[in-house]
Amino acid sequence: ESRGLGDVYKRQVLGVALLVITKNYNLGESIVYAASIGIGFGLALIIMAGLRERLEFSNLPKAFQGIPIALILAGILSLAFMGFTGII
């Protein structure tokens, strides 16, 4: 049973803390890094929710309805976001 997004947020905070420690950022860099990750996570949630809402009204084959199309969307979004790595 899923406990909701609360667990996701807890894991995100822990992950950011671990990444900041391993990258040896100072306080200012840590704050900017954490804020950027939060904004990126929120952007990904909004994009995913918008796409899933649009797909509810589209004519999909029965095999792709529900979780399968969500996994395909997540894969395509991850590829799109991987394009942003190395820009900065």
Image (cartoon, rainbow, N blue to C red):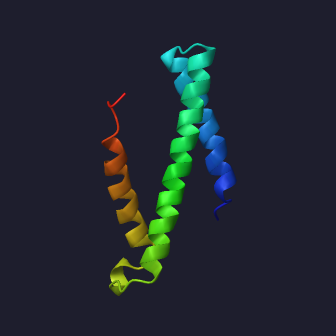
In front of the other: 23 or 87: 87
Where is residue 6? Give x, y as percent: 69, 52
Residue 38: quadrant of the picture? top right
Tell me which residue sits at (33%, 42%) in the image.
82
Where is residue 56? Give x, y as percent: 46, 80
Q: Is residue 62 left or right of residue 18?
A: left
Tell me which residue sits at (56%, 42%) in the image.
39
Q: Can residue 18 be seen in this view?
A: no
Q: Is residue 2 left or right of residue 40?
A: right
Residue 71: quadrant of the picture? bottom left
Where is residue 25? Give x, y as percent: 54, 15
Q: Can residue 45 be seen in this view?
A: yes
User: Is the residue 88 above or below the residue 41 in the image?
Assistant: above
Residue 86: quadrant of the picture? top left
**How many numbered tags mark residues here?**
0
Where is residue 30? Give x, y as percent: 59, 22
Q: The C terminus is located in which quarter?
A: top left
Q: Is residue 75 left or right of residue 27?
A: left
User: Is the residue 65 above or below the residue 73 in the image?
Assistant: below
Tell me which residue sits at (64%, 65%) in the image.
1
In front of the other: 81 or 9: 81
Tell me which residue sits at (55%, 22%) in the image.
20
User: Is the residue 63 above or below the residue 80 in the image?
Assistant: below
